[in-house]
Image: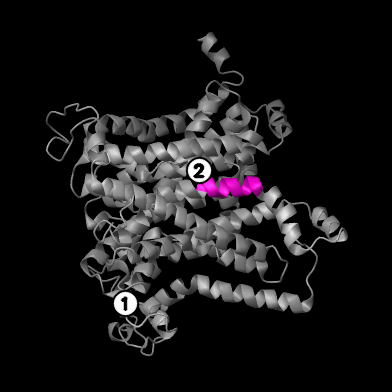
Amino acid sequence: MKKLKDFFRYDNAGLLFIFPAFIYMMVFVGYPIISNIFLSFQDVSVKNLVKGEKHFIGFENYINIFNDGVFIKALGNTLLFTVSCLIFQFLIGFLLALLFCKKFSLAKPIRGLTMIPWMMPMTVTALMFKFMFSTDVGIINYILRKAGLIKQNIEWLTTPGTAMIAVIIANVWIGIPFNTILISTGLSTIPQELYESASVDGANALQKFVKITLPLLRPTIESVLVLGFIYTFKVYDIVYVMTEGGPVNSTHLLSTYSYKLSFDLFQYSKGSAVANVLFLILFLVGLLYLKITMEGEND
Amino acid sequence: MDERNLSKKKNIIYNIVAVLILIILLFPLFWTFITSLKTEKEIFLNPPTWYPHELNTKSYAAQVETGDFNMFKSFFNSFVISSGAMAISVILAVPASYAIARYKFIGRKAMLLGFLVTQMLPVSVLLTPMFIMFRNLKMYNTWGAAILADATIGIPFSVLILKNYFASIPAALEEAAYIDGCTRFSAFMRILVPVAKPGVIVCAVFSFLYGWGDLAYGMTFILDQEKRPITAGIFNFMGQYGTKWSYLTAFAIVAIIPVTLIFIFMQKYIISGMTNGAVKG
């Protein structure tokens, strides 16, 4: 008893404070992760989910999904979706951050209002964009027609290709505030004197941007991009609500395909295998992120 | 960047540019709101009308009535689920983050890493195992399942945010409390938590928002439309009445009421959460 008390006396007292959260996460996150790995090596479907025998079938699910055209398509789609979203949300977010760091009178309230898209439930965002992209009543087709860019209405969400463009646009809309706010914070940490002395030395705006802003902003840019990659790569709601992966699987991402396998087709084990591939990719990118952020922190 | 004060002319130009950008960015919201006040006939007019010529509030009124259009119930479900997830997240994350900020206990680094990794987890990895678990626990098809699942998003986020708050509180404050006879626990409750209150609010707000925005858990673990959150209700409704846009847009507006309120009253906490949560990891 005394030994136990001594153990928790100093630094290990922290264990008592973290214990409840730790147990919770082990039960509701740790256990499911392990269980999902087991599941992906079994043959669980709707028949034997609750009762009945489950067999270990080794790598069969993984071999099956890599021979499955839809999985390969979803993998490619996920990469295309993530990279396109990242490029656009980063560039637009960066430009907005540069605008808002000018000290004009409405800068702060307007920057605040641009955060709204990020806070909204993705289901609602998906609904709004589904409405705007709809063929006959969609405002986007109307605007494009008015501008003379198209003659006939585009069937955005029911044509492969344009459906992908539509979900990317919807997701960029959500991602812009995240990029704006992080880059704004990064910009505000750059010491003002640097710009002043550069002005004294006769540097123009472009030179200041390339020689001061970009290099000093590098850590911020790195974490914005890696975090953006992680968040975008696992996006589920937007696509599921707007297209459910269709038409003809053209917008299926790994996340939506995994959900479809498990909860529409009840092939739980195959769905788990897809989810694990998704997780593995995110995990590797996550390690990269940790390497970046932990470099500065030594605790 | 350039912090020098702007000239009057430049100030006006920047303001105009910023307002124009804001109008474009928030246009989807404006358009959804306008549409929710139009009649179904007016929505299908070509060219579209920029404001409702005939004001129609029926789509909102239908939501408190019974039947398929009753979103009021889903709103309440969402509220219960998000509040429950928020309570669990805050209660568990506050002491945990204090431990990480203040004590160098065994396994600290591994646990911190664990919280970081959880934040990167796709929902699909947890869905099926949780689904089986909740069935075995006889919690399938209850609010509880969604609450427990949603809290797994709030907890790691809150721990990572709050550890920075606790780390920034001077250790002398805590030591003074010990001298005055506080135990570790009472010092934590009476001195540290009140000082870290802004951080606790950030965590509460985000945990609530995560719960409010969730679709996957609410839809998968709750079967009855009667108990489902509003996001699942909207999704369901879209599947059944795909083109009833006046109702759909009205549901969308109702679903973002809490988000709007949180935004109006807690904006500074939102911005603080977004920056601290991501940059410092």
**Mark 1, residue position:** B246
The location of residue B191, given as percent across then percent down, is: 65, 37
At mark 1, the secondary structure is: helix
Amino acid type of disc 2? Phe
Q: Which residue is located at x 37 percent, y 78 percent?
A: A141
**Mark 2, residue position:** B157
Res A132 seen here: yes
Vertical arrangement, residue B268 with respect to residue B162, above or below: below
Q: Which residues are magenta?
A: A218-227
Q: Which mark is residue A120?
A: none
- Which quadrant holds residue A205? bottom right
Confirm whether the magenta stretch covers residue B233: no
Distance between the alpha carbons at the discs numbered 1 and 2: 36 Å
Res B81 seen here: no
Q: Which residue is located at x 57 percent, y 50 percent?
A: B273
The location of residue A186, given as percent across then percent down, is: 66, 52
Q: Is residue A101 left or right of residue B137?
A: right
- Of all chains, the one bearing label 1 is B
Callout 1 and callout 2 share a chain: yes
Which of pointers 1 and 2 lies earlier in the amino acid sequence? 2
Confirm whether the magenta stretch covers residue A219: yes
Q: Is residue B162 left or right of residue A98?
A: left
Q: Residue furthest right?
A: A200
- Of all chains, the one bearing label 2 is B
At mark 2, the secondary structure is: helix
Q: Which residue is located at x 80 percent, y 68 percent?
A: B5
